[in-house]
Image (tube, helix red, strand yellow):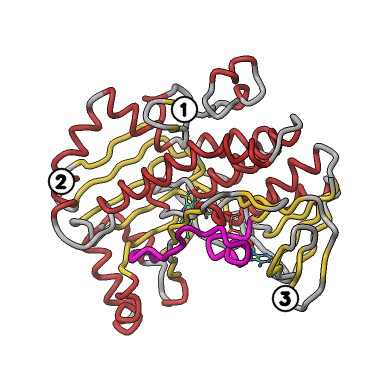
Amino acid sequence: MNVCVVGCGTSGPAAALLLARQGHAVTIFERVEDPGPVGAGILLQPTGMTVLADLGLLDPVLAMGARVDHLDGRTTGGRKVLDLRYSDWRPGLFGLGLHRGALFQALFDALESTGVDVQCGVEITSWDGRHALDANGTKHGPFELCIVGDGARSLLRGAGRVEKRARRYPWGALWAIVPDPNDDFGGVLKQEYEGTQVMLGTLPTGRSPTTEDRLVSLFWSMHTDAVDAWRAKGLRAWKDEALRVSPRSAPILDQLVDIEQVTWAEYYDVVLTSPIGDRVVYIGDAAHAMSPQLGQGANLGLYDAWVLADVLGKGGTLADYAERRWWHTFTYQWLNRIVTPFFQADGELLGALRDACFGPLCTLPFFRGQMLGALAGAKVRLFDEVPTDPPLLGGPTASRHPDRP
Ligand SMILES: Cc1cc2nc3c(=O)[nH]c(=O)nc-3n(C[C@H](O)[C@H](O)[C@H](O)COP(=O)(O)OP(=O)(O)OC[C@H]3O[C@@H](n4cnc5c(N)ncnc54)[C@H](O)[C@@H]3O)c2cc1C
């Protein structure tokens, strides 16, 4: 097939690579003129790593990432809220703290060697079933399939009239990435909370894609309405508050000397009526953007790409793809909608409930297993799982997994 992919973030290049590997002629359009390794620290889950392993990119990505074995969340008073170790769920499993740019670079570099036609500086605004039209009015194609991976604020999703819901969360986060030369923040994703209005997190973020420095990311939860006031008060006032909440974060905060080092990120909640249309399929954030509370966005996007290629490689249809992805996507949309307010919300009730219940639940093997399965990106419905171990992807045991026909 002659295939076009819109968006060269995470899910787009993964789909392009997988389809080019199957022998399809793939063109990828990216609106940024000169896309580079930018972005926040993300937590790559075993599901995402499974797909990278199939792409032959896991080793370079592991080399750039920082292993995360433990999720440790406490109130500022020291009460345990989250205490989860991946290895309690499956021995040997772990998350990977990674600069989003390092993931981008690994995928982008691989595009070159697979013969994908990468066209940068081209903003696609609509798809007519055969052609992709760009912002200058140029018609590209014909293509037999358009894969839309243009992110949370997808233009094509709107043009294709498949949006059921696409709204901005009332809460987002400030984030910053700085060097962590002595690995002081290694191994653990740590969070501190005060109710549901204050949250500071640190994530080991592996190597910088540009300088090779070892990095750590700091996240600070904030209501969208509070951003202007935060900026007006200035960096000093915020650093004092962050230091009060998390004294251990002093080595990170000390490195922030200019407010421009701190970036504001908004989150979107996107639900589609259908991820497919006339020779078009929506993947990644374009199809199901969500808050990063469970650390799933990039993983779900990679998984979409993998399932799409698997379905097409076996002669399946877009409807088969939509069916295979439905439960996994639906499960995480709901989990995110249920879990996020326990960490980012107005009011006191949910924070108090979280502080009272989450810590004890983490000590009960059944609930710990369920929470870890959800964190690993594997949950489908209540008790099923998608594969998270690279050999399972194509291996003989794969058929028992619920994302398979
Ligand atoms: C602060 C923060 C923390 C996060 N933490 C995590 C985490 O821990 N774990 C996790 O898995 N995920 C996390 N995420 C989410 C994750 O980054 C996204 O889910 C993921 O990047 C989505 O990939 P994508 O390819 O679908 O979209 P994107 O990465 O947004 O890529 C879309 C691409 O399409 C291009 N584009 C847009 N419109 C057009 C157009 N019209 N024509 C051509 N090109 C276009 C864009 O320039 C971009 O390159 C986090 C996100 C944020 C903001």
Q: Does residue 225 appear left or right of residue 134 in this picture? A: left
Q: Residue at x 31, y 57 (%)?
A: 200
Q: Position of residue 132 (x, y in %)?
A: 76, 64
In the figure, residue 236 lies in which quadrant? bottom left
Q: Which mark is residue 135?
A: 3
Counting residues from the N terminus, which is met first, the one under dot 3 or under dot 1?
3
Name the residue tied to disc 1.
385
Label 2 with label 3: CB-CB less than 8 Å: no
Examine the rendered structure and indicate whether residue 95 appears above or below residue 150.
above
Q: Does residue 261 appear left or right of residue 238 in this picture? A: right
The answer to whether the beta carbon of the residue marked 2 is less than 8 Å from any atom of ligand 1 is: no
| Magenta-drawn segment | 149-174
Q: Position of residue 82 (x, y in %)?
A: 27, 40
Label 1 with label 2: CB-CB less than 8 Å: no
| Residue positioned most to the top | 396
Within the magenta stretch, is there residue 168?
yes
Within the magenta stretch, is there residue 183?
no
Q: Where the C terminus falls, by quadrant?
A: top right
Name the residue tied to disc 2.
353
| Residue 103 visible to an observer of this rendering | no
Q: Position of residue 176 (x, y in %)?
A: 44, 64
Query: Which is nearer the eye, 93 or 371?
Result: 371
Counting residues from the N terminus, which is met first, the one under dot 1 or under dot 2?
2
Counting residues from the N terminus, which is met first, the one under dot 2 or under dot 3?
3
Three-letter code, disc 1: Glu
Q: Residue at x 16, y 44 (%)?
A: 79
Spatial distance from mark 3 to mark 1, Cα to Cα? 41 Å
Query: Which is nearer the eye, 300 or 45?
Result: 300
Q: How many marks?
A: 3
Q: Where the N terminus falls, by quadrant?
A: top right
